Image (spheres, rainbow, N blue to C red):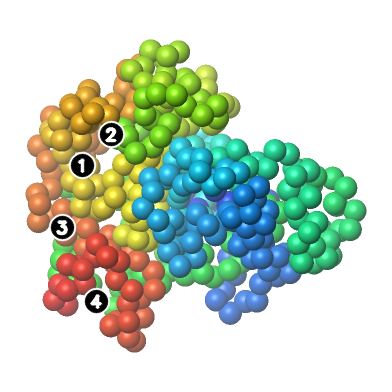
Amino acid sequence: MPPRVPLILACVLALVVMTLASCGGGSGGGGGESTIASATSPLSTKAELGRLIFSDTALSVSGRQSCATCHDPSNAFGPSDKLSVPLGGPGMDLEGFRATPSLMYASYTPRFSIASDGTPSGGFFRDGRSPSLADQAQQPFLAPFEMANATPADVVAKLSTRPYLSRFEAVFGEDIMGDPTQVLAAIGAALAAYQTEEPGFHPFSSKFDYYLKSQATLSPIELKGLALFNDPTKGNCAACHVSRGVNGNPPLFTDFTYDNVGLPRNWKIPANQAGPQPSYVPQNGAALGGDYAYYDLGLCGPFNPDNAFRGSLCGLFKVPTLRNVALRQQLFHNGVFDNLNDAVTWYVTRDTAAARWYLKQDGTPDRLYNDLPPVYVRNVNVGEVPYVQNLAPTLDAQEIGDVVAFLCALTDGYDPQNPAAYRVPAQCAAAASAPP
């Protein structure tokens, strides 16, 4: 596993350069290269076109899927259902492989790179395989288990029927429709512009944001949770989910690096289960000497072949932002937990309560780190608190609740002038009722 000794330095460097299986967006060139529009700036013509494309289901084979289908604007541009992975394909009945990430704050992600010490960071999708938000936005149009178009020409055929075609040609040129590859690239650029310019993708309007500006007060339980979140001997969450801003930027609660935390296998993902699999499911388990037919190895595959030769990267996934995490019902890249209390409890009892977390499909105990083939178990993070093997849990039940209360305060939509109108996530009722 790449060393994480210089982690804090990497956190700072990543935030200094920043300017975050589904439709992406951001600058036309790449993440972190464009200026985020202010709340009062009108959308450019390109971004307005991206707004239309973002919600247009007619560009999918099923006629029922758009970017907004998985990235619901009413739920922090993340999934609003309870499925571990999204459905797509020609009949909207093919399951994906990873939990859909939120697109909130996506436009701050730097390009993928591997530092001289071996630490990977940046890039798009959970495995960093896409160099820019514009590139990321193109891929779901051709994925067989998402929008399911067979070729870029199929996307062009659908686009040619849309009422905004003339606007598309006005932005990108009338001749572009003769080049399907360029059309798809233009669609990605429009979606990228929309997500970069639209303030709703990066409002920085959580209670915590107003607390940082001295316009709101965190409750005692939220303050305790923040302290535990930052404490390197307790939660140590801030080692990767950086809670301090840099150069005037609010904190994004990610350092954009990658980690292998040894998650339990999620048996709700069809590709993880035993039995016949659809043809689009990679059957890589036997070659890896694993117990199961399919493994998601993150940075080194099966969807990121560029790093297949880098064994030390196998099982590493991008550290996500924790902003709006309380709105999610699918936590971590494989959606194995559906609530924050379980996720934080696992975080501090991964090895000491392994029999609770690591189970076979039939519910009986499985080996530790069972979502990895044995050959890559060596890449699991066992050197940082609270992941140090045989270390007693660093948080008790009350402290876990405190951390969850703080995480709830990272939900956007707080109005310091009208706190009672705050949309409190369902799992945050206890935090909301805590005394000020």
| Residue density around tag 4, few if under 14, some if 14–19, many if 20 or more, within 10 Å | some
Q: Marks 4 and 3, Cα distance to the nearest angstrom?
A: 19 Å
Name the element at disc 4.
loop
Q: Position of residue 312 (x, y in %)?
A: 42, 23
Choose the circle earlier in sequence order: 4 or 1. 4
Choose the circle earlier in sequence order: 4 or 3. 4
* Mark carried by residue 217: 4
Q: Answer above or below: position of 237 versus 363.
A: below
* Mark carried by residue 401: 3
Q: Amino acid at mark 4?
A: Thr
Observer-nearest residue: 123 or 9?
Answer: 123
**Residues marked 4 and 1 touching at CB (< 8 Å):** no
Disc 2 target residue: 264
Taking the image as shown, residue 61 lies to the left or right of residue 418, namely right
Name the element at disc 2.
loop
Q: Marks 1 and 2, Cα distance to the nearest angstrom?
A: 10 Å
The C terminus sits in image quarter: bottom left
Q: Which residue is at the far right? A: 175
* Mark carried by residue 346: 1
Taking the image as shown, residue 203 lies to the left or right of residue 146, namely left
**Residues marked 1 and 2 touching at CB (< 8 Å):** yes
Observer-nearest residue: 347 or 251?
Answer: 347
Choose the circle earlier in sequence order: 1 or 2. 2
Q: Position of residue 257 (x, y in %)?
A: 43, 41
Q: Amino acid at mark 3?
A: Gly
Q: Amino acid at mark 1?
A: Trp
Q: Marks 4 and 1, Cα distance to the nearest angstrom?
A: 29 Å
Choose the circle earlier in sequence order: 2 or 4. 4
* Mark carried by residue 204: none
Q: Amino acid at mark 2?
A: Pro
